[in-house]
Amino acid sequence: MANQEEIKKVELQFNQEIEKIGQESDLEQLRIKYLGRKGLLTMMLRSLKDMPLEQRKVIGPMANKLKETFEHHLQIKKEELKAGGEIKQSIDVTRPGKKINLGHLHPLSIVLRQVVDIFNGLGFAVAEGPEIETEYYNFDALNLPAEHPARDMWNTIWLDGSKSQNQKERLLLRTHTSPVQIRYMQSHKPPVRIISPGQVFRFEATDQTHHFQFWQLEGLMIDEDINLGHLRYIIEAFLSRFFGRKIQSRFEPSFFPFVEPGLQFSISCPFCKSKGCSSCQKLGWLEMGGAGMVHPQVLRNVGYDPKKFQGFAFGLGLDRLAMHKYHIPDIRLFYNGDLRFIRQFKL
Ligand code: PHE
């Protein structure tokens, strides 16, 4: 015999079960369970006739209403399942896609690619050399024999186990990319037109503008009739393209044993047209690197005839170039792996 409590229980149970249903055949089972010939609600309705009148007056309308409600819910659910089924079968191409997190280039890689691109356009090929170098290539061949005081210009990281070997074969981490000049000239006849980007290492303390490991760009051009005018043109053409505006260069005397004359060059500040701003520390000029005409002794060391061939070489810091271009205040940001910094360079 049904009472109000039982009716409420059946309603609750029905609601819970219909919620979980995922396909139409299950929905039909549910209908039979409650509204079929021997269904739970059907049996309750059937028992009405045996009830005392007073009770029937209350239970009767409740049970009949519930029957209507169940039928209504079953109908709605049926439509829902139909609609859902269609969505599953066809892909809605207008819905926004899921964002996939792609990796991207490190700022130094971006700059490296730009630089290589520009120099390729100027007719320069890329040459590479080892990061672990011998004393001969890093120093001697560059006109820096053992005990030459100018060796102190580069605080060198010597490698273990190098002491007992033949002096020229001693190993070190290259302090500059200039040894690639030697390796390239030894294996190629002039004319030479190369750049050599690469990592170099110095036994030095690290601060905002210095790192014990950084990137250099070496340039070398040798032919029968090369002079400093060519150097200046190449430097200005390269940097104007790199910064996207006209750049002027300024050369001052300096000393490197592998060039004669030796020079140091700066460029007009690309951000303030040499008026002075925070990027150039109000100087109007940015220091770029070293350069000069390749020393005749270096040419002789690689078997070139200095009477016939001459050319220029230059070296500059790629990290510094990237720092200027993107206004990065601290060189250590390139190397400490902080993704918050790196992610800003996602294109
Ligand atoms: N190798 C020099 C350095 O690291 C730079 C340089 C390269 C200077 C080529 C002159 C010519 O300081």
Image (cartoon, helix red, strand yellow):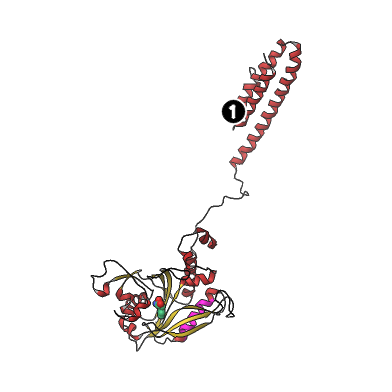
Magenta stretch, main secondary structure class: helix
Where residue 176 sits in the image (x, y, percent)?
38, 74
**Residue 289 seen in the figure:** yes
318 vs 95: above or below = below
Where residue 95 sits in the image (x, y, percent)?
62, 48
Looking at this view, is 63 or 8 the one in front? 8
Where residue 153 sits in the image (x, y, percent)?
38, 78
**Residue topped by disc 1:** 26
* Count of numbered labels shown in the rendering: 1
Quadrant position of the C terminus in the picture:
bottom right
| Residue beneath the point at 67% across and 22% down | 8
Q: Is residue 233 magenta?
A: yes
Quadrant position of the N terminus in the picture:
top right
Looking at this view, is 242 or 307 the one in front? 242
Look at the image and give the residue range highlighted in magenta.
229-240
327 vs 86: above or below = below
- Looking at the image, residue 108 sits to the left or right of residue 138; the answer is right
Q: Quadrant of residue 31?
A: top right
Q: Quadrant of ligand 1?
A: bottom left
